[in-house]
Image (cartoon, rainbow, N blue to C red):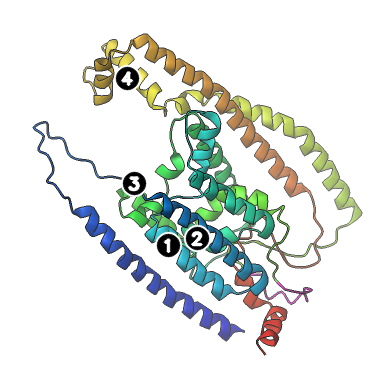
Amino acid sequence: MISDLIRHDQITRKWTVVLLLSILVCSIPTQIHSQIQRFPKPEFESGHVVPTPTTPHPRQDIYEYIDVAVLIIALSTASYLALKKRSRNGIFMLSLFSLLYFGSWRKGCVCAIGSIQNISLALFDRTYVIPITVIAFFTIPLLFTLFFGRTFCAAVCPLGAIQDVVILKPVKVAAWLQKVLGFIPHIYLGLAVLLAAYGADFIICRYDPFVGLFRFDASFLMLLFGAVLLIGGIFVARPYCRFLCPYGLILNWISRLSKHHVTITPTDCIQCRLCEDSCPFGAILPPTPEKAPEARSVEHKRLAILLALLPVLIIGGACLGSLLHTPLSQIHNTVQLAERVRLEELGKIQDTVIESETFQQSGKPVEQLYGEAALIKNRFIKGSTYLGGFIGLVFGTTLIGLSIRRKRRDYTPDRGTCLSCGRCFAYCPVGKKESKEDEK
């Protein structure tokens, strides 16, 4: 068995090199095309520099629907390989395809992760027209997760695939540290929804660590952030997926309700413990020992206290969240402009910026600008209060979940955190025996 695992690791290293070379080759035509201009740049006496586009060129509608079709086919294949075929090699090869197609070729857009913001803005702003393909990229992985678990994370998401290929020497992260870091995606998701709903910013796209690598146009800080995640991902498997990704958090919730899900062994567990440390994501739950009646009584009392404390945590979080409405509202461009114009009118700032100059030349009354900014600030009071209450709810329910003892007889994958990657398949002697019999 050890020789098989070593051989699999060697295959992984080989395909990692092939993948990186393929990404470089696929990106060369795009880079050359972006450097060629049909007409020379205009010369401005003001010293204006033509900005470099930060988004890929618009694609024809037919290609957008092709992307949706590829997404459905990839999800179907990933679900088949994970649940029916139980093939780790097949899942790995499919993830390479997803990285090349959705990452290198498609430039990471449309992105299921970033679509959270489009959906949020469409729900709160009736004037925003959301493309049908964005809705598809948001909902289709959720539907597959509801039936088959997180197979989207296993082999379809390019952000997960680029991290998966660098997992070489994974170390185990302490359970308590995973729980603490697990709060970050909740905060990230809440902020992303709040800022997108009020038209302030799309922070998921702005601070995406890997799309800039796919497009070769990221800022130095984002390139550094992505490099740190990839280098750290050699030891801490998929750090972005586990401790940052807001879409992965939604998939986590839905996967707990999935009708079908990946299992470590295709039949009954024989308690061999070989799979115990096979998961680099810490998603395998061990059997629970029997506890004395006294310990159960203490757990019941703790649960009752936490249930009573839950409303307090929600209200306290809402109060703290409401205090953040001012700095959060200042992210909105209209609020920034209003404050800038006010400081210029009061003489506290002598120089002007292009935004304030454009506003002054538009002839729009200053009072109207101040009124729009005040309205946005009032909306952020409500939104930040809800955000704080949400974080309080998450904190309280996490504590309640830790206090509830779930009886387990076998080693089983955590339905929420399991990425359906199939790494544990090779460690189960029952599964290996059945696969050999199927080959015969």
Indicate the amino acid at tag 3.
Answer: Thr
Query: Horizontal placement of 203 versus 392: left or right?
Result: left
Residue at (86, 58) in percent of width and height: 291
Q: Earlier in the sequence, mark 3 or mark 1?
A: 3
Q: Earlier in the sequence, mark 2 or mark 4?
A: 2
SS state under label 4: helix
Indicate the amino acid at tag 4.
Answer: Arg
Q: Which residues are magenta?
A: 265-277
Alpha-carbon neighbours of circle 3 within 10 Å: few (<14), some, or many (≥20)? Answer: few
Alpha-carbon neighbours of circle 1 within 10 Å: few (<14), some, or many (≥20)? Answer: some
User: Marks 2 and 1: in contact by CB < 8 Å?
Assistant: yes
Q: Nearer the viewer, residue 375 or 4?
A: 375
Residue at which label 1 appears: 101
Residue at which label 2 appears: 70
Q: On the rendered image, what quadrant is the C terminus found in? A: bottom right
Indicate the amino acid at tag 2.
Answer: Val
Mark 1–mark 2 distance (CA, rounded to whole Å): 9 Å
Q: Earlier in the sequence, mark 4 or mark 1?
A: 1
Q: Nearer the viewer, mark 3 or mark 2?
A: 2
Question: Is residue 357 placed above or below 86 in the rendered structure?
Answer: above
Question: Is residue 119 placed above or below 320 in the rendered structure?
Answer: below
Q: On the rendered image, what quadrant is the N terminus found in? A: bottom right
